[in-house]
């Protein structure tokens, strides 16, 4: 009996049938192909943030400013920062590397993605690096210069929604006329 079993095993291995031939091939896992966003020449080469992404960029900048100012206030016991301190924090906020941000395409629409922005579809390709960090830094410095450090800090003290309103949703803001997004921290809590 052992000799017959051994012979069958050798013949099935040589013949290539093995267990797959007897039981059928295991089901193939479904494959998905997710293309990277197709960027226009402006999106690839311009030193400026494309108009279609400015609202997302503003929300990312407001989130980073809020995070940096809150962290600095936490170090001094939640007290208000001195003018020289919040000016330094705002400069540091805008000069950070911004490498965690990039662009992805979702349902044919390009969106900026990263911390402080609503989470996007889990199966998407994020194009980061390249011009995106420089564009975010440049926009951030522009907002600080346009609004002024004192006004930005005052809005921060009133809360994240006030800061987003000042930077993004005012009459001339990049999100003017669009519905304000929920606070990212609250959105994350609702997802859990």
Image (tube, helix red, strand yellow):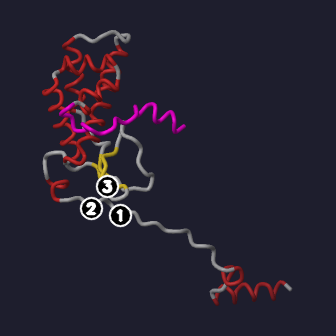
Drawn side of residue 148 relative to residue 37, left or right: left
Callout 3 environment at 10 Å: few (<14), some (14 to 19), or many (20+)?
A: few
Q: Residues within 10 Å of mark 2 (few under 14, many from 20)?
A: few
The answer to the question of whether label 1 and label 3 lie on touching residues, with beta carbons closer than 8 A, is: no
Q: Which residue is mark 1?
A: 35
Q: Secondary structure at mark 2?
A: loop
Q: Which residue is mark 2?
A: 38
Q: Which residue is mark 3?
A: 109
Task: Identify which residue is drawn at 40% across, 31% down.
Answer: 183
Q: Quadrant of residue 142?
A: top left
Question: Dot 1: within a 10 Å radius of its alpha carbon, few (fewer than 14), some, or many (20 or more) residues?
Answer: few
**Contact, mark 2 vs mark 3 (Cβ under 8 Å):** no
Determine contact: label 1, label 2, CB under 8 Å: yes
The CA distance from mark 1 to mark 3 is 13 Å
Magenta residues, start to end: 171-192
Distance between the alpha carbons at the discs numbered 2 and 3: 10 Å
Q: Nearer the viewer, residue 105 or 19?
A: 105
Q: Nearer the viewer, mark 2 or mark 3?
A: 3
Instruction: Provide the secondary structure element on which disc 3 rests.
Output: strand
Q: Residue at x 19, y 17 (%)?
A: 150
- 23 horizontally vs 165: left or right: right
Residue 68 percent location from the top left of the image: 31, 25
């Amino acid at each position: 009996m052992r000799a017959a079993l051994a012979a069958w095993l050798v013949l099935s291995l040589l013949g290539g049938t093995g267990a797959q031939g007897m039981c059928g091939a295991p089901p193939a896992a479904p494959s998905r192909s997710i293309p990277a966003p197709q960027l226009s020449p402006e999106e690839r080469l311009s030193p400026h943030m494309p108009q279609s992404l400015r609202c997302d960029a503003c929300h990312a900048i407001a989130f980073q400013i809020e995070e940096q100012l809150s962290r600095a206030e936490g170090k001094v016991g939640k007290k208000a920062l001195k003018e020289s301190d919040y000016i330094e924090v705002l400069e540091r906020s805008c000069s950070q590397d911004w490498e965690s941000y990039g662009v992805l395409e979702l349902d044919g629409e390009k969106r900026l993605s990263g911390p402080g922005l609503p989470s996007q579809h889990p199966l998407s390709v994020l194009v980061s690096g390249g011009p995106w960090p420089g564009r975010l830094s440049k926009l951030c410095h522009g907002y600080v210069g346009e609004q002024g450090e004192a006004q930005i800090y005052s809005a921060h003290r009133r809360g994240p929604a006030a800061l987003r309103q000042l930077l993004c949703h005012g009459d001339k803001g990049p999100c003017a006329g669009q519905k304000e997004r929920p606070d990212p921290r609250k959105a994350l809590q609702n997802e859990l």
